[in-house]
Image (cartoon, rainbow, N blue to C red):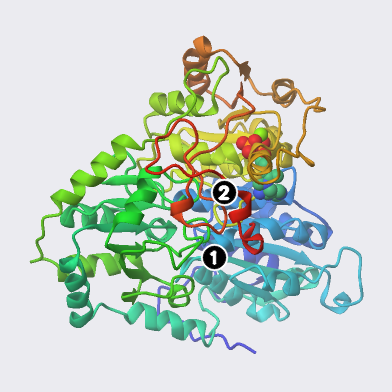
Amino acid sequence: MTAVVKPAPKPRHPLAGQEMTCADTILQVLADEGVDTIFGYSGGAILPTYDAIFRYNATHAKSEEIRLIVPANEQGAGFMAAGYARSTGKVGVFLVTSGPGATNSVTPIRDCFADSVPVVLICGQVPRAAIGTDAFQEAPVFNIMAACAKHVFLVTDPEKLEATFRTAFEIARTGRPGPVVIDVPKDVQNALATFQGTGLLKLRGYDERLEVLQQSSLSDADGKAFFRLLAKSERPLLYVGGGVINSDASEACRAFAERFQIPVVSTVMGLGAIDTTSDLSLHMLGMHGAAYANYAVEDCDFVFAIGARFDDRVCGKPLEWAPHARVAHLDIDGSEIRKVKKAIDWFHVSDAKRGLSELLRAGKDFHKDFRPWHEHVRELKKRHAYDYNRASPLLQPQEVLEVLSDIVKGEAVFTTGVGQHQMWAAQYLDVRHPRHFLTSGSMGTMGFGLPAAIGAQIANPGKLVIDIDGDGSIRMNLGELETCTVYDIPVKVLLLNNLGDGMVRQWQDLFFSNRYSGTDKSMHKKDFVRAAQADGFGYAARVSKREELRSVLEQFVSFKGAAFLEAMVDQSAHVYPMVGPGLGYKEMITGAFIPARQVVKPDAKKLDPSSMF
Ligand SMILES: Cc1ncc(C[n+]2csc(CCOP(=O)(O)OP(=O)(O)O)c2C)c(N)n1
Ligand SMILES: [Mg+2]
């Protein structure tokens, strides 16, 4: 049993000492935590808390209201909360009922865990006395979520509910961020308890690890060792991941790259950590990364991984990855060190922002001229740039994104579905700022784009938010189109329709001799434009002609409300470059339009069947 920690002396909460229902306490803690929006769907076991939202808003000024956004499906609520959190760094909140409400939330919880996104999910649960009886709408939330969340609480003692909620926010945002689930039986929501206004649960293990992390600082010896490695290097590279964005270390990362003049490759999660249009940016590495980024990894002699975890989409063959390089690793999570890439020459466990600032200080007298290496990577960038079939009469998905990027010039928050369109979005959109490219990176969850865009738009009312979606992905949460118009959320949805599950077809083309099992969508009847119109979109259009592309895209992004544009694109386009699953960068294929250093033919036999993921 966890004890409640004695609160540190702070100004007394105006409501401290009052008796209130736990449902009202939940609302008050959310308000104290700065929550301005709850995404959620109601139901029997969570009704007391929904009622508390109504009463809270009825008794508070408009400016203090906690907005409730009701999705079409709880999965949508989870991705809205995730979009809110990813685009701001603040904790996103979603609120669902027991049983099916909770199980519909499993996917976004796992998705948030896999991408280290801070959200709190509040689930109603059947009353305490009914737990374990297979009661109506009962699901073993604790057991299910324990496998997917950073932490799960089942509140059985009303006196501990308040501290549990405050602790949940603390856990979600501290250390390596992640999702926290709180399961609250209905009778606990109705129970009375004394409001304290402060106080956290003591969590042995977590608190201690956090303390160590907060105390950790770069020793002189470690600082010197790092710069000895850099001094020996002629061809250094920064490999930047989502951890840089999560710890708001983008500025420190840019300063570090500039100060020591080190080129930067980024994971899909790290896009925007440094401006992708800057000279030092070598864009994305990995399975569908830039050929020049992957060649730079092949050629470098020192890699500094920051907030990145050598995921299989980057490092399918750890032994062959960066074969000539010494490797340094800075990460907030000690369990990531040597998890995949075993040969690590230097590491430091710390928040990326702090670690980078300390390294900058430690290297204040360091000078080395890497100009020959810059010359080399500049040449790589020029020779092996992203490219596609520009001669085709059919609209190419890449050109749609290229023109869009030229119109918005990096001043938009993008979300994506999952598939080819996601990878083309990562490749062809300029991402100039952190938290401006929101995608389901680790889980690769189709259906993420539209609800994530809604959440990001709510968190950033003044910004242009554009969901780049696929015809397969958008169908998974198509009900959320109506959520845009019900709440007048002016997101822009750009659907790259290639009539099917393009990414799966690409793998079937390359590795399964064009057998389109389960991916032939020629039977489809869906008219997406009419669907958007039916859901109240004031702008819903389709484009398939090159001559109209730019003007239609301009109208689309400048439309004042929610806008939907379907671009009918070449179904046969493939995403290149491609490093096949489980293969090394030597096996990278660049397709017909990107010059390769050496010609590699796709060879299904080379694939290790055990790593066909
Ligand atoms: C929920 C879910 N189911 C299945 C998959 C496997 N999958 C990955 S990409 C893809 C096809 C996506 O199709 P679409 O959204 O049209 O994107 P495209 O590749 O055509 O651009 C599938 C089925 C997934 N990533 N997520
Ligand atoms: Mg598609």
Asked whether residue 195 appears in the rendered view, the answer is no
Q: Would you call the spot at circle 2 few (<14 residues within 10 Å), some (14-19), or many (20 or more)? A: some
The image position of residue 272, as x and y in percent, is 38, 46
Asked whether residue 295 appears in the rendered view, the answer is yes
Q: Residue furthest top?
A: 547
Q: Tell me which amino acid carries mark 1.
A: Gly
Q: Which of marks 1 and 2 is in front?
A: 1
Do the residues under discs 1 and 2 have CB atoms within 8 angstroms?
Answer: no
- Looking at the image, which residue is at 85% across and 67% down? 138
The image position of residue 140, as x and y in percent, is 80, 72
Instruction: Report, in whole angstroms, how far the alpha carbon at label 1 lies from the one at label 2.
Output: 26 Å
Q: Is mark 1 on a helix, strand or loop?
A: loop
Residue 382 lies in what quarter of the image?
A: top left
Read off the residue under disc 2.
65
Q: Report the front residue among 66 and 89.
A: 89
Point out the image quarter for the C terminus.
bottom right
Residue 344 placement, left or right of 376: right
Read off the residue under disc 1.
178
Q: Tell me which amino acid carries mark 2.
A: Glu
Q: How many labels does the image show?
A: 2
